[in-house]
Image (cartoon, rainbow, N blue to C red):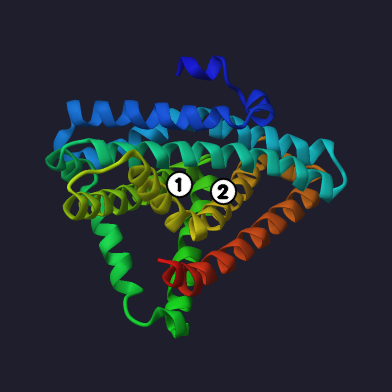
Amino acid sequence: MVVESFLNPFNAEKKPWQMFFLGFLYTSVGIALSLWIFRSEASLVTVFMITMAALPIFYNTMRLEEGKDLLMDKESEILKEHNKAISFFMYLFVGITFACALWYVVLPTSTVNQLFDKQTSTIQAINNQVSGNAIHNLNAFSKIFFNNFKVLAFSILFSFVYGAGAIFILSWNATVIGAAIGNFIRANISSYTSSLGLLEAGNYFHVFSLGLLKYSIHGVPEIAAYFYGGLAGGIISVAIVKKHFRTEKFPAIMRDFSELVLIAVGFLIAASFLEVYVTPVLF
């Protein structure tokens, strides 16, 4: 896209907040095109639209981060540089999520049902898995962790095979979380309206904030894990494409890959704990 000429990985790492607006733009354009051209399959086509738009900058970032492994020796410095990429990826993800939540709230119900059909089914399936007394249920923790670990494995695999394939999984998760937040906001707005007869600006902001907080408590570390995994798979993919596996630097690249995966697993453990033992208590 034309935007890529103004926003490359070098600039994005310096001003990661710009990625929020890029994610919002990609999502809004993807939603508009999906509803206009592929209305009956808009829920999936939107994800593909977002993926295609974000793919160039995601892949260029993989190349940039793999190059840092060749130029830098200290692993602590390499991880510090990788965190810059993770930071602007998170802003991109938040932008996509925010756009989905906003359009879920403001669009007519019939349009929302078409636009987030597959996402809503996924949310219902997840809720059924963790229903019941999840606070003291170790099985729920294990189920959520291994389900998230499966997504992490696919993020690594997709990035390894397709270079930046993890962006599809991350875009899908962003639309699911955005739909969940939008549904939460919409349901509570209806509750306020029916009980008070109107909805003041303060109440609207309160509901919107609760919706973001409910899913960000465990969602932020979970998505960070997927980004670390996607970055790890992408670095290995670029190294193989550029035949860097034949150089003396490849062991350092593999060590970097292993550390990124371990960090990702650590974030998944924290996210699963928060989702099972903290979020249900607060909400």
Label drawn at residue 156: none
> What is the three-letter code of the residue carrying label 2?
Phe
Q: Quadrant of the C terminus?
A: bottom left
Query: Which tag, 1 or 2, sits closer to the chain's start?
Result: 1
What residue occupies the far right of the structure in this picture?
73
At a point 37% along the width and 43% down the height, the residue shown is 202
At a point 62% along the width and 33% down the height, the residue shown is 61
Estimate the x, y position of residue 231 in percent, counting from the top left: 61, 46
Can see residue 82? yes
Per the image, label 2 sits on a secondary structure element best described as: helix
> What is the three-letter code of the residue carrying label 1?
Leu
Can see residue 47? no
Q: Quadrant of residue 6?
A: top right
- CB-based contact (under 8 Å), mark 1 and mark 2: yes
Q: Nearer the viewer, residue 185 or 2?
A: 185
Badge 1 is on which residue? 170
At a point 44% along the width and 83% down the height, the residue shown is 139
Q: Nearer the viewer, residue 221 or 66?
A: 221
Tell me the crowding category of disc 2: few under 14, some 14 to 19, or many 20 or more residues within 10 angstroms, Cα based.
Answer: many
The residues bearing labels 1 and 2 have C-alpha atoms spaced at a distance of: 8 Å
Where is 270 relative to 58, above or below?
Answer: below
* Number of numbered discs visible in the structure rendering: 2
Q: Nearer the viewer, residue 247 or 100?
A: 100
Where is 88 relative to 131, above or below?
Answer: above
What residue occupies the far front of the structure in this picture?
196
* Residue 166 located left or right of residue 176: right
Estimate the x, y position of residue 183 in percent, counting from the top left: 27, 51
Per the image, label 1 sits on a secondary structure element best described as: helix
* Residue 139 located left or right of residue 40: right
Q: Quadrant of the N terminus?
A: top left
Badge 2 is on which residue? 227
